[in-house]
Amino acid sequence: MVGVYLSGTGNTKHCVEKLVKILDPSAECFPLEHNDIIQILKKHDTIVLGYPTQFSNAPFMVRELIKNNSSLWSGKKVFCLNTMGLFSGDGTGCTARILKKYGAVILGGLQLKMPDSVCDSKMLKKSIEENKLIVKAADERIEIAAEQIKSGNFPREGLSFIAHMKGLFGQRLWFYNKTTGYTDKLKISDRCIGCGLCSKNCPMENLKIENNKAVAGNKCTMCYRCISLCPKQAVTLLGESIVEQCRFEKYV
């Protein structure tokens, strides 16, 4: 077994690592952008794949990796896990349907509410104490799911036709243009000091430093990693200013 995740602010990393370690204490977990991720995936028959949902869809980086390595998935047993700030509908189903198309066996799905990771919007913001309770509830659900999996009863959240309709009509149909590819909407203000923290942490290598200032390309996967880490709060995406730099470490 191996855990693989895309995680911008640490939510999904925590959830995948917790589930995998309960199921198999000897198993390792790796970020999706790991240099050897394809070889790692090839070596394992059972994969826990985790990612945050964006407008009830899986990040394009996740979907692209699956499609660009279509021959890899035949016969692989995959358990899909998605994190969400509020709602995803069929967040696990978005990747499960693609994986099945390429021959993967979908073991199940788990959809977990976690603290909001969108740093430049007030919509889902909560206090640190409220977010700690959200994390505690997610941890309890992971522990329950792990015991179910050990007994052979895999959760199947987000995989049904009804869940598909909820995700489609709940958000994805209205916001699909935002998730059909990468975005070039990342904004960097004059507050940037060119420290390079964003470029070092971007999973898409979408940021570089030129003339002591960060410059963004058109390959942003909307993970919010750079936005949550910038020491000068100089990077935004959906909003115009930072409301809170959301990091999982604040809630434990």
Image: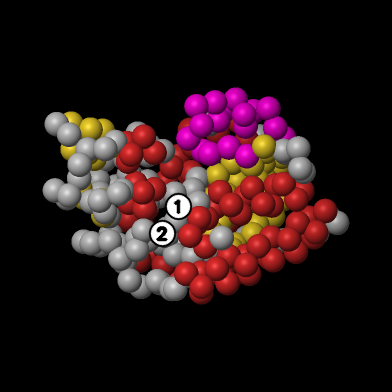
Identity of the residue drawn at 59% across and 41% down: 4
Percent of width and height locating residue 184: 25, 45
- The quarter of the rendered structure image containing the N terminus is top right
Q: Closer to the camera, 215 or 243?
A: 243
In 3D space, how far apart are the residues under numbered discs 1 and 2 (Cα atoms)?
A: 7 Å
Identity of the residue drawn at 56% across and 60% down: 252
Residue occupying the far right of the picture: 151
Give the SS element for disc 2.
loop
Lateral position of residue 137 relative to residue 124, left or right? right
Lateral position of residue 184 relative to residue 113, left or right? left
Percent of width and height locating residue 218: 26, 40
| Circle 1: residue type | Thr
Give the SS element for disc 1.
loop
Mark 1 touches mark 2? (CB < 8 Å)? yes
Is 139 drawn above or below residue 17 in the view shown? below
* Magenta stretch bounds: 29-45
Q: Closer to the camera, 241 or 107?
A: 241
- Whether residue 102 is visible: no
Question: Is 51 colored magenta in this rendering?
Answer: no
- Whether residue 110 is visible: yes
Percent of width and height locating residue 216: 24, 40
User: On the image, which quarter does residue 54 sit in?
Assistant: bottom left
Mark number, residue 9: 1
Say few, some or many: other residues with alpha carbon within 10 Å of mark 2 (under 14 / 14 to 19 / 20 or more): many
Identity of the residue drawn at 20% across and 42% down: 193
User: On the image, which quarter does residue 75 sit in?
Assistant: top right
- How many numbered dots are placed on residues in this image? 2
Mark number, residue 246: 2
Identity of the residue drawn at 58% across and 52% down: 14
Mark number, residue 215: none
